[in-house]
Image (spheres, grey):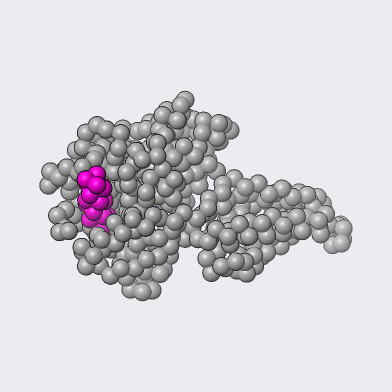
Amino acid sequence: MDEILEIKRERIENDFKMLETFTDPEAPWTRRAFSSQNKEARKWLADQFRAAGLDVYNDAASNLIGRRGGEGDQVFMMGSHSDTVIEGGRFDGIVGVLGALEIARCLQDSDIELSLPLEIVDFTCEEPTVPISPVGSRIIAGDITQKDLEGVITPFGDTIHKAIDDLGGDSSDISKAKRALGQIVGYLELHIEQGAVLEKEELAAGIVTAIAGPCRGTVQFIGQPEHAGGTPMPDRKDALVAAAELVIAIEKIVTTTGMSEENVGTVGWMNVSPNMINVIPGQVDMSVEVRSTDLESLVLVRKSLEEEVEKISEKRKIESKLTWDHLEDPVPLPLFMQDVVKSAFTDLSIPIKYLPSRASHDAARIAPITPAGMVFIRCLEGKSHCPEEWASMDDIVLGIRLLGQSLLRLNENFLKNKKG
Ligand code: HGY
Ligand code: MN
Ligand code: MN
């Protein structure tokens, strides 16, 4: 299929320059979900969506949606997220949102109508700014119910209800945002790899086969705060030493369990109290996150981690509590969607490379209700979730061309199936 969409590089360059100005000035590039920067960026994005000829609205989950091609329940969908981690994404998620916007502009420029309406989406709160994230894509999939919102507070001190409403949603009834299976006929997402496979093989782009499932939780160790001088070592119930033991144990578990090269484990934050130099830590709260592209390994890793917390607790006579906040299994992407994306690579004469995603994406969250496909572009040294995260404009333009060609191929596939 010929490439008929004319991507405009300088429009894209301007978009990136503008969007990255919506950041916490003290910690670029930080635009956390529900922050003032997120709200400002959303206003700017909505204006760009409108200028691209899209009908713009927020669904009840506050996802920002631009729609072209008239009414009807069934749509094609493309998108990603514009919220970031702290000091992270100039490209993580942004490439997918701005890529979808550019494709909408190209369809408008060439007056091309697809066989179904197209919706482009900036999903709300993809990053774990609140424990129930990803919020927007999970609500669309019906994976977050009204009850799940209860008690959730954002880092800015708002209830999740107020936060969703402030972003244009309707937290009084988020089920209005839910889409039924089949309503989204196909979903496409462009994203940076957040790994170094493409760069190592000197490839600019790849076809995603599966998305690793992040399992996130918190562990609390409760020991005994005591005098750091007067308490002999054998008599201590030091919560921080217990936590330190667990950090090392997690590294050992993920590197020796199941298909270990597919597993990763991280302790991202830890709170020690009372956090004073001359007091034995009485309590530690810490995050645990394990992921794998292999389900069996992930189940074994989670089980070993639970057993390890028990073991440390007994050995040190310290109370412990492990709470899993969020369990995601690995998500294989449907072969026919991989073929749709592959045909776009062939159309543009781009070398074919299949690879799994070790990072999670909105695509994984809406996969239960729609066939999802992903295009990856390389990122510098595979880095992401840090200020050094970077992708070249050449690769971004190529990624958007592949996204657009995949959409046209998805449309062709839909028409073929319709004719039967
Ligand atoms: O954590 C992730 O994989 C994604 O960047 N939220
Ligand atoms: Mn991310
Ligand atoms: Mn992302």
Residue 345 image point, x, y percent: 26, 63
Read off the magenta span: 402-420
183 left or right, relative to 262:
left
Residue projecting furthest to the top: 172
Magenta-drawn stretch, dominant element (helix, strand or loop): helix
Magenta segment includes 416 = yes
Q: What residue is at 33 percent from the left and 55 percent from the top?
A: 337
Residue 321 on image: x %, y %: 71, 48
In which quarter of the view is residue 152 placed? Answer: top right
Viewer-nearest residue: 82 or 16 = 82
Image location (x, y in percent) of residue 261: 53, 69
Decide which of 13, 293 is in the foreground and name it: 293
Res. 237 in view: no
Q: What residue occupies the far left of the structure in this picture?
A: 110
Q: Residue at x 65, y 67 (%)?
A: 252
Q: Is residue 285 left or right of residue 5?
A: right
- Compared across the picture, whether 260 is left or right of 136 comes to right
Residue at 64%, 65% (x, y): give it. 253
- Residue at 40 percent across and 65 percent down: it is 355
